[in-house]
Image (cartoon, rainbow, N blue to C red):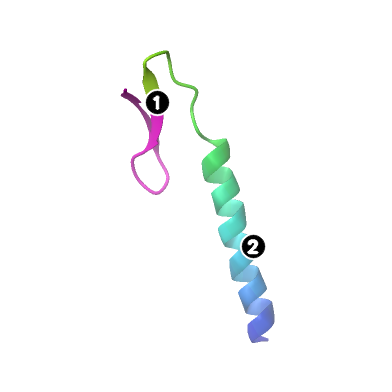
Amino acid sequence: MKLRLGFGVALVVVLYGIWVLSSKPACLMGYKASLVSFKAWACIPL
């Protein structure tokens, strides 16, 4: 039972990581994407 729960938690963590990376915005020249909080991206100047 513990092993099954561990795999479930690991799957959620991996899917969350994929979602965060895939939601990264494309910023204009001279700006870069930065993770401001655990779920929001912002374009900041270089």
Question: Is 10 above or below relative to 6?
Answer: above
Q: Residue furthest top?
A: 29
Q: Amino acid at mark 2?
A: Leu
At 53% from the left and 35% from the top, the residue drawn is: 23
Q: Nearer the viewer, residue 1 or 46?
A: 46
Q: Residue furthest front?
A: 46
Assess whether residue 35 is covered by the magenta stretch: yes
| Quadrant of res 41 | top left
Q: Nearer the viewer, mark 2 or mark 1?
A: 1
Per the image, the residue denoted by label 2 is 11
**On-image quarter of the N terminus:** bottom right
Q: Which mark is residue 32?
A: 1
Q: How many marks?
A: 2
At 43% from the left and 15% from the top, the residue drawn is: 28
Segment tinted magenta in the rendering: 33-46
Which tag, 2 or 1, sits closer to the chain's start? 2
Secondary element type, mark 2: helix
Task: Report, in whole angstroms, how far the alpha carbon at label 2 lies from the one at label 1.
Answer: 29 Å
Where residue 38 sits in the image (x, y, percent)?
39, 49
| Quadrant of res 37 | top left
Q: Residue furthest left?
A: 45
